[in-house]
Image (tube, grey):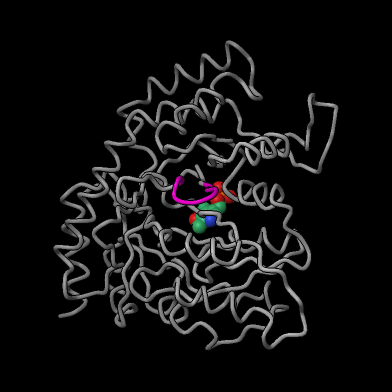
Amino acid sequence: MKSIEFIDLKTHGSIIGDKIKSSIDRVIAHGRFIMGPEVYALEKKLSAFTGAKHVVTCSSGTDALLMVLMAMGIGPGDAVFTSPFTFIATAEVISLLGAVPVFVDIDGDTFNIDPFKLEKAIEDLNKNSTLRLTPKCIIPVDIFGLPAEYETINKIADKYNLFVIEDAAQSFGGQTGDKMACNLTDVAITSFFPAKPLGCYGDGGAIFTSDDDLNEKLISIRVHGKGQHKYDNIRLGINGRMDTLQAAILIQKMTIFREELKKRQIVAQKYRKRLKGLVQFQKISDKFTSAWAQFSFCSEDRSKIMAELETNKIPHAIYYPKPLHLQEVFSMLKYKKGDFVVAEKVADTILSIPMHPYLVDEHLEFIAKTIVSAFN
Ligand SMILES: *Cc1c(COP(=O)(O)O)cnc(C)c1O
């Protein structure tokens, strides 16, 4: 048996490898490595795919988040509400700008931010603190590819006059009803890191919005805060561009992306059928479609399952073993164990197993059998 990949980054090459090579050759031939025509062509395709009016591609998902917060003028004294159960980048950018991440516990079924606790956190913001923070923004995270509850979150945001940034780094291709992830609220970001649902051959990201004014600011921030021309600088920005080569690769990868999403769905359904009753799946309500960045479940028997997977050389991972409120980097925020019991419990029991469109039945069956055997 071929070895099992946790996330397969190579098989697409046997389907579109030649097209990707020709696209790369075209870029080499025209030589416009920075902001070449492929970058704008990709933005058009991403806009059509998600329904967002504007797309600003950029250097990574992290820079995408940073650029949006910069465009919104987030800084010292501002509070940004987010989930403690996410990748560090989501909260890191808040602190980088001198603002304060305010964590809100997650829902134990979806592993996404709990909207009811969110409203309470907004109400209680300055209650037991000498800090006088201004609530500005919410960053829900679509964890493992499942969109958060934007219908409720958007209502809360309206009520308290906050804006919402969808961290769709893991959910490009996911849906709520017939609305695509990246177009579920004011503004969204995604990542094209190779292991994400739509990955490039290095770092890359994008920002999605239908707000014309925000779009203009983002285009400026992407190139050092440029004004009418490059050497006219009207605000602080960064070097946040996506390489033309990465755009050329993504254009080709998008041609098989819908098919890959379907294949991910099938893999997820098969896992669910085989592991039903043994582990606690991420709950995906009727209206929601996950992009299946990860297939993750909770189990009190995680260490037993991991031991079996290890014995059988099946790759697996814990996303994320330590919630952000307990990370050393955020010790200045003075959170402690017990502050977000749901996130802590999920971190203690969560496990991710191989998930990608090219997982063959033979491998899937072997993985499922191995997990089942941990319970015998
Ligand atoms: C991957 C990821 C990011 C950061 O994306 P990069 O492209 O790696 O910078 C941000 N948020 C979440 C939830 C992620 O999974």
The residue positioned 26% from the left and 63% from the top of the image is: 285
Dominant secondary-structure state across the stretch colored magenta: loop
Residue that lies at the very extreme toward the front in this rendered image: 159
Which quadrant of the figure has residue 159? bottom right
Q: Classify 65 as above or below 261.
A: below
Asked whether 120 or 363 is in front, the reply is 120
- Residue 348 in the figure: left or right of residue 278: right
Q: Position of residue 28 (x, y in %)?
A: 58, 16
Q: Classify 161 as above or below 236.
A: below
The residue positioned 48% from the left and 77% from the top of the image is: 117
How many numbered marks have been drawn onto this rendered protein structure? 0
Is-magenta flag for residue 188? yes
- Residue 344 in the figure: left or right of residue 215: left
Asked whether 6 or 140 is in front, the reply is 140
Magenta range: 182-189
The residue positioned 24% from the left and 49% from the top of the image is: 265
Q: Position of residue 296 (x, y in %)?
A: 33, 65
Q: Can I make out residue 298 in this image?
A: yes
Which quadrant of the figure has residue 123? bottom right
Q: Can I make out residue 205 in this image?
A: no
